[in-house]
């Protein structure tokens, strides 16, 4: 490592030129990375709803409707004409309305009242629209422009908000976060240029990471929203390790080149160890079958690798080239000494283990949350929120489902339709038989008139159900429809729709939960065991952070708030990987001082020496999370930010309030189960 450090310092200008070139190249690629805004695309291929979507896309031109559009103050004739006008808009693929469910040549008074009122009332008409989600913002704008009082709700709105919100909100988040980072770093460093160099290095790492996403094909909008912020927040402490080491050697009288080489060599082990646990925590997400996990896990793990590279290579090169400027901009540290806090915790640490009594309670509570699996929240006071409330009040919570059954057995299909029509919650059903009749052969009709309902292999039924997108009632209705379809067409039907996909998403994520958490804990524990050459220490460190995770995720249950399960799953891995570094650093200092100090003195010194180092990255990670939560209009991203910010605070608190007591109580066990470790047995 000394030779590598010497090469970096000796070729500092060449290093800067190389990184500048790479930053420009990959920075230009960032806008070219495709962004996927549809969470349904990440449900695994084996899920029934995913297979259904594949068959629909292969055999039919019209996918499942993804929006409800209300047009006010239209009569029957005007509503019929408006259907054609909606269908002509750019980005609109198909429109279904009352005439697809009943025969308008017959008086509406003799038609099924629930069906009619699901599409036409005295106040206006409601249409089921299928829009191209790749053009969601444009399609939504066109639909809203049909009338000053037009209202739109559904998946189209979710996708539009995701697309318009992601790019603008990232800019806002960074605009808030960067000045905050500068202020915090000024407090924790001793040169006015330290924040500039450190943020430059980490900014380059973010650019390299986000630019190389081009090789992944595409990334999700959630990854796009949080990856850069999280990469900055979780890797900031790597740079601080290097800066504090450089400063310590500089104060010892070493020249610039010598102090930088020594800092790189000295901090490399700690940085690599810390980054390894973080990377493994992120990589645990790769084993999720819900593909959002691999999407986010790969990008975050890759980001930490780039941060590691930039901190150990680019940062020393910056200090070598601008050594005189750094020397001329020195200032005193603005952080106080934490010796008093260290002495206090050394005295009370064993008594604070009373916290352990709450750990089992938190573990149980975090599994009892009211979980949500979709993006259901719109910004308060927004047009989208008002539109959804109005449509649900006027027409109820109507969702479309598409059911495919093998074509040809008209008697069996008729029996299925009759049974489905009796299901509580099914308010309308459109099929070939309901539109044309089972006694008229499809072959005698023009192909374009039956293509939406019949393919070569399947009959297509469009069900309209009175149901929310998720929850026990919604999932119970999906299961009931599946049971009926299974009884008529055993393993030969396909069902999809927003609530159907959400149910499959829920089942997939629940299965992933055990795998992801188990792998994250096992991999991080293995790295800790190898790093400390110990058996018991990894258990104590992982227990400390896992307990903080359980406290974090139990709070929504205690406060009666719902929790996005995607955020729950991601935070479980990210908080472990990002904050176990805090426990590692405190433990390293404790072990070093236990060689010649008592347990109480070792804890006091460990707290004194690490508190000022760790409070900065913990504050930054917390601030990054809370900024995400306050700025993002996307419910899943906002909740993820809240959980990450709260998790950083809780992990930091547990490392200083809980871990010291564990180290003291298990002191002798730690010594006996750590290779080649000897502690002081009595005060000299």
Image (cartoon, rainbow, N blue to C red):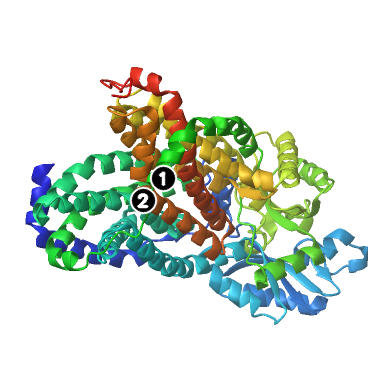
Residue 88, percent from left and from top: 61, 76
Q: Which residue lies at the image location 70% right of the left edge and 36% below the top edge?
A: 486
Residue 533 point in image, percent of width and height? 30, 25
Q: Is residue 118 above or below residue 438?
A: below
Farthest-out residue, front = 684
Look at mark 1 in the image and give the residue it sits on: 340
Give the image location of residue 500, x and y in percent. 65, 47
- Res. 136 mark: none
Query: Dots 1 and 2: beta carbons under 8 Å?
Result: yes
Extreme-bottom residue of the structure? 148
Q: Is residue 102 visible?
A: yes
Q: Residue at x 22, y 43 (%)?
A: 268
Q: Is residue 560 left or right of residue 620?
A: right
Q: Is residue 66 found left or right of 246 in the rendered image?
A: right
In-front residue for pair 87/610: 610
Residue 328 position, x and y percent, is 17, 68
Q: Residues within 10 Å of mark 2 (few under 14, many from 20)?
A: few
Quarter of the figure with residue 389: bottom right
* Badge 1 element: helix
507 displayed left or right of 299: right
Quadrant into which the N terminus falls: top left
Which label belongs to residue 337?
A: 2
Q: Quadrant of the C terminus?
A: top left
- Up the image or down, 166 lies above or below 597; here it is below
Q: Is residue 456 above or below residue 207?
A: above
Q: Residue furthest top?
A: 672
Name the foreground residue: 587 vs 557.
Answer: 587
**Picture residue at 17% right of the left edge, 43% below the top:** 265
């Amino acid at each position: 490592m000394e030779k590598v450090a010497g090469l970096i310092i000796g070729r500092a200008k060449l290093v800067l030129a190389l990184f500048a070139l790479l930053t420009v190249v990959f920075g230009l690629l960032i806008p070219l990375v495709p962004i996927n805004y549809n969470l349904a695309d990440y449900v695994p291929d084996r899920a029934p709803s995913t297979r259904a979507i594949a068959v629909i896309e292969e055999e039919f031109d019209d996918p499942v409707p993804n929006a409800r559009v209300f047009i006010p103050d239209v009569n029957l004739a005007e509503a019929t004409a408006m259907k054609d006008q909606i269908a002509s808009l750019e980005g609109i693929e198909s429109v279904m309305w009352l005439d697809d469910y009943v025969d308008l040549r017959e008086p509406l008074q003799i038609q099924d009242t629930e069906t009619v009122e699901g599409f036409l009332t005295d106040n206006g008409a409601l249409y089921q629209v299928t829009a191209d989600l790749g053009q969601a913002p444009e399609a939504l704008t066109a639909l809203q422009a049909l009338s000053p009082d037009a209202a739109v709700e559904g998946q189209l709105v979710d996708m539009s908000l995701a697309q318009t919100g992601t790019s603008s909100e990232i800019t806002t988040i960074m605009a808030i976060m960067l000045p905050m980072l500068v202020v915090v770093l000024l407090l924790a460093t001793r040169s006015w240029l330290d924040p500039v160099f450190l943020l430059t290095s980490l900014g380059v790492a973010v650019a390299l990471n986000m630019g190389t996403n081009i090789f992944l094909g595409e990334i999700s909008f959630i990854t796009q929203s949080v990856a850069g912020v999280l990469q900055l927040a979780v890797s900031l402490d790597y740079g601080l390790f290097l800066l504090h080491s450089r400063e310590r050697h500089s104060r010892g009288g070493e020249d610039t080149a010598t102090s930088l080489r020594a800092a790189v060599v000295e901090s490399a082990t700690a940085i690599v160890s810390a980054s390894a646990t973080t990377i493994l925590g992120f990589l645990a997400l790769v084993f999720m079958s819900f593909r959002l996990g691999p999407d986010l896990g790969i990008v975050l793990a890759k980001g930490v690798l780039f941060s590691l590279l930039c901190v150990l290579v680019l940062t020393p090169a910056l200090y070598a080239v601008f050594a005189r400027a750094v020397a001329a901009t020195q200032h005193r540290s603005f952080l106080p000494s934490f010796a008093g806090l260290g002495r206090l915790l050394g005295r009370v640490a064993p008594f604070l283990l009373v916290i352990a009594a709450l750990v089992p309670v938190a573990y149980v509570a975090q599994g009892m949350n009211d979980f949500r699996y979709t993006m259901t929240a719109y910004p308060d006071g927004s047009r989208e929120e008002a539109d959804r409330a109005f449509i649900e009040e006027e027409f109820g919570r109507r969702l479309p489902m598409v059911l495919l059954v093998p074509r040809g057995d008209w008697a069996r299909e008729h029996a299925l339709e009759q049974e489905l029509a009796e299901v509580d919650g099914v308010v309308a059903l459109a099929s070939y038989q309901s539109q044309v009749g089972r006694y008229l052969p499809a072959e005698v009709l023009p192909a374009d008139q039956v293509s939406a309902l019949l393919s070569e292999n399947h009959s297509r039924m469009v069900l309209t159900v009175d149901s929310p997108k998720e929850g026990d009632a919604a999932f119970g209705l999906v299961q009931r429809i599946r049971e009926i379809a299974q009884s008529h067409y055993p393993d030969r039907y396909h069902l999809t729709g927003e609530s159907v996909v959400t149910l499959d998403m829920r089942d997939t994520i629940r299965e992933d939960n055990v795998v992801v958490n188990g792998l994250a804990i096992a991999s991080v524990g293995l790295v800790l065991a190898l790093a400390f050459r110990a058996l018991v220490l990894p258990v104590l460190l992982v227990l400390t952070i896992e307990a903080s995770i359980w406290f974090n995720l139990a709070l929504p249950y205690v406060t009666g708030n719902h929790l996005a399960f995607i955020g729950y799953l991601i935070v479980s891995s990210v908080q472990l990987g990002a904050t176990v570094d805090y426990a590692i650093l405190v433990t390293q200092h404790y072990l070093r001082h236990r060689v010649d100090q008592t347990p109480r003195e070792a804890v006091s010194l460990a707290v004194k020496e690490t508190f000022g180092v760790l409070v900065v990255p913990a504050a930054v990670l917390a601030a990054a999370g809370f900024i995400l939560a306050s700025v993002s209009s996307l419910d899943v991203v906002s909740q993820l930010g809240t959980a990450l910010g709260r998790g950083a605070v809780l992990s930091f608190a547990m490392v200083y309030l809980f871990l010291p007591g564990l180290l003291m109580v298990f002191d002798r066990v730690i010594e006996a189960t750590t290779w080649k470790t000897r502690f002081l047995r009595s005060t000299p």
